[in-house]
Amino acid sequence: MFEARLVHGALLKKVLDAVKDLINEGTWDCSATGISLQAMDVSHVSLVSLNLRSDGFDKFRCDRNLSMGMNLTSVSKILKCAANNDIITIKAQDDADTVNFVFEAPNQEKVSDYEMKLMNIDTEHLGIPETDYSVVIKMPSGEFQRICRDLSQIGDSVQITCTKDGVRFSVSGDLGTGNVKLAQTANVDKEDEAVIIETQEAVSLTFALSYLNSFTKATPLSAQVQLSMSADVPLVVE
């Protein structure tokens, strides 16, 4: 038997909104430690690695390890049936071919129950290798989202250049060029508003803005974002 209950159900909706445009389907691997999902997008350019720890749920039960293949677009449609303040419970039997979503109003006056068929998905665990990155940037997630959105009006790809002095986001396109420079925050009262740059060596790399804009859909989940970069190594956005 698997059961995971989340009083703040809106959080699960935000998680799905963050990944559903990158990956259409994925396997939810459930264990006593929580739920993990790992999948590559159709183009095999980006890897999504998601972990929902068991202690983040208000109730979590997983009698034995369980892998549930789900169409994430379908999950997102079902979650849209839940109000933002609903309590969401996910249930599945150990050998079931379906998963249940239960939405409860806080006042207990309304309970909705949805059942969805599971899929058989062939997956390979790629993982994100442990790497000593040349540059690690921590900055407000809303600021990163705004920069990616603004620069995508100018061009399709952004060059991120990082030195000890700061980080520069540069773009060029048919209509011209654009640059956004961020200096490291000297001192700030609110940690969420800080820009912190750890540099081993200067790095300048170029990335597709379409993917970065997809990554920034996770902005509502955290006030801060961390970018880890090294030459010839994929960018990690956390």
Image: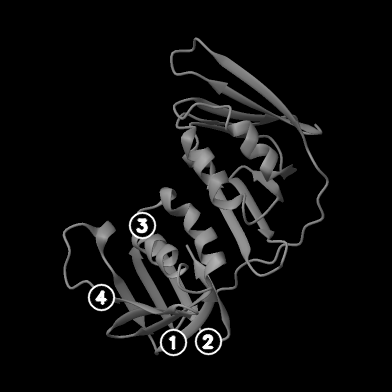
Furthest residue to the bottom?
201
* Residue 205 x %, y %: 49, 83
Q: Are marks 1 and 2 in contact (CB under 8 Å)?
A: yes
Label 2 element class: loop
- Classify 201 as above or below 35: below
Q: Nearer the viewer, residue 69 or 208?
A: 208
Label 3 element class: helix
Q: Amino acid at mark 4?
A: Gln
User: Callout 4: few (<14), some (14-19), or many (20+) C-alpha neighbours within 10 Å?
Assistant: some
Marked residue nearer the N-terminal end (4 or 2): 4
Mark 1 and mark 4: Cα distance apart in space: 16 Å
- Classify 118 as above or below 180: above
Q: Which residue is mark 3?
A: 142
User: Callout 1: few (<14), some (14-19), or many (20+) C-alpha neighbours within 10 Å?
Assistant: some
Question: Could you say which disc has been placed on residue 231 in the image?
Answer: 2
Q: Is residue 204 left or right of residue 125?
A: left
Q: Which residue is mark 1?
A: 203
Q: Amino acid at mark 1?
A: Val
Q: Nearer the viewer, residue 235 or 80?
A: 80
